[in-house]
């Protein structure tokens, strides 16, 4: 592989300023330029992008600046031989810190007081509403970069941590690891169920009515994975029927979440606009991944994070 241009697709602006990304990628060897739809590519191009485009299949290497690559047609990449790399590995602080924020808000009722602040409302929550994270149980579904980061922090905060992953292999700071076959058992005792898995054929619709019924009535669902991992109507019904206590949803079924979506109005829901990973150094984290792979290409080694 011989790279003579890094083309930064304008969709990168969904995660960070284009100019920052270009500056971070700029090195002495390979020119970097911003490209829009309509640009063409050849077998010496590396494309850095947020979203997929068919034209990228003419490049030799496409780097997706997200961990999730569910929007990319992996089979098409495999058919053309264009390398596809993703950005897993860089979200081990951002997303877990956001998850800690959600859990702390629910336990300490911060989201409720923030809402009341705008009405100068001094009302205090009922005596039995606040609780401590210490001593509660969290079930982390997906124990990769993000899930491990959640587990580490949850353990440090005194939560009991259980987790789920296909391999069932043990993980640090996780008392018990279940496989997806035992998801029902994994969530049953949890005060928080945190979704940190990729969207795949296996995980799509994984959180359905049946699973929500297995969750405790005082539990909270946190989705920082992808919207379709959760069955939308099932979650809305569970919230309306008090089958669970609430939810924090960062990854949605349709983005932006439509203005009239019922989730916006749920007092027991924290909606964030797919920002759990946002940070002012995102461009640097991505550039470090791309740079590492350019060096690997020079050494004739395989690409890190290659998914096709
Ligand atoms: P990793 O690849 O590091 O980890 C994914 C984990 O999910 C692995 O532990 C994997 O383990 C597990 N997994 C895969 N399939 C299943 C399954 N069927 N059931 C349970 N666990 C499963 O990815 P990241 O941690 O970097 O990211 C995870 C996902 O989070 C991304 O794919 C993306 O969709 C989402 N994401 C969202 C962000 C946001 O802004 N909200 C930011 C970054 C990522 P095993 O192989 O053993 O099953
Ligand atoms: C943008 C991160 C991912 O998969 O969904 C996230 O990485 C987007 C900052």
Image (cartoon, helix red, strand yellow):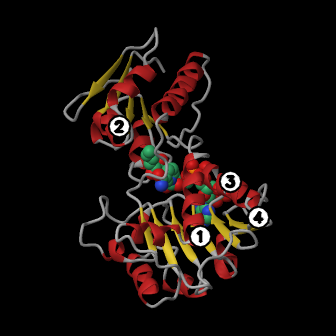
Q: Nearer the viewer, residue 295 or 233?
A: 233
Q: x%, y% of residue 277?
A: 49, 48
Instruction: Find the distance from the CA under tag 3 to the CA under tag 4.
Output: 15 Å
Closer mark to the observer between disc 1 and disc 3: 1
Q: Give the structural element (helix, strand or loop) at label 3.
A: helix
Locate residue 266: give its quadrant. bottom left
Instruction: Find the distance from the CA under tag 1 to the CA under tag 3.
Output: 24 Å
Residue wearing tag 4: 158
Q: x%, y% of residue 29?
A: 45, 10
Q: Which mark is residue 108?
A: 1
Residue wearing tag 3: 148
Cβ at disc 1 under 8 Å from ligand 1: no
Q: Residue furthest bottom?
A: 241
- Choose the circle earlier in sequence order: 2 or 4: 2
- Choose the circle earlier in sequence order: 2 or 3: 2
Q: Give the structural element (helix, strand or loop) at label 2.
A: helix
Cβ at disc 3 under 8 Å from ligand 1: yes
- The reply to whether dot 2 and dot 3 touch (C-beta < 8 Å) is no
Residue wearing tag 2: 12
Q: Nearer the viewer, residue 144 or 23?
A: 23
- Choose the circle earlier in sequence order: 1 or 4: 1
Q: x%, y% of residue 242?
A: 49, 88
Q: Which mark is residue 145?
A: none
Q: Residues within 10 Å of mark 4 (few under 14, many from 20)?
A: some
Instruction: Find the distance from the CA under tag 2 to the CA under tag 4.
Output: 38 Å
The residue lying at 76 percent from left, 72 percent from top is 135
């Amino acid at each position: 592989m011989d790279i003579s241009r890094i083309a930064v697709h304008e969709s990168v602006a969904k995660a960070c300023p284009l100019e920052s990304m270009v500056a971070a990628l700029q090195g002495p060897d390979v020119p970097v330029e911003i490209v829009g739809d309509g640009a063409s590519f050849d077998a010496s191009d590396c494309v850095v992008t947020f979203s997929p485009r068919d034209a990228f299949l003419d490049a030799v290497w496409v780097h997706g600046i997200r961990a999730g690559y569910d929007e990319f047609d992996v089979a098409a990449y495999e058919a053309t031989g264009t390398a596809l790399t993703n950005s897993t590995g860089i979200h081990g602080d951002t997303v877990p810190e956001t998850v800690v924020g959600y859990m702390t808000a629910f336990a300490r009722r911060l989201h409720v007081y923030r809402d009341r602040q705008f009405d100068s409302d001094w009302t205090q929550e009922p005596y039995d509403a606040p609780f401590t994270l210490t001593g509660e149980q969290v079930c982390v579904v997906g124990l990769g970069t993000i899930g491990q980061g959640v587990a580490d922090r949850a353990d440090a905060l005194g939560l009991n941590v259980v987790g789920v992953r296909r391999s069932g292999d043990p993980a640090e700071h996780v008392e018990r690891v279940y496989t997806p076959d035992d998801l029902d058992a994994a969530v049953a005792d949890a005060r928080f169920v945190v979704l940190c898995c990729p969207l795949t054929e296996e995980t799509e619709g994984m959180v359905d009515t049946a699973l929500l019924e297995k969750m405790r009535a005082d539990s909270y669902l946190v989705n920082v994975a992808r919207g379709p991992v959760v069955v939308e109507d099932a979650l809305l019904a569970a919230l309306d029927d008090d089958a669970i206590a609430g939810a924090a949803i960062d990854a949605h079924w349709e983005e932006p979440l439509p203005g009239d979506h019922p989730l916006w109005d749920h007092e027991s829901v924290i909606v964030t606009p797919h920002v759990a990973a946002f940070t002012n150094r995102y461009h640097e984290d991505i550039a470090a991944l791309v740079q590492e792979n350019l060096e690997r290409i020079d050494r004739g080694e395989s690409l890190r994070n290659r998914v096709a």
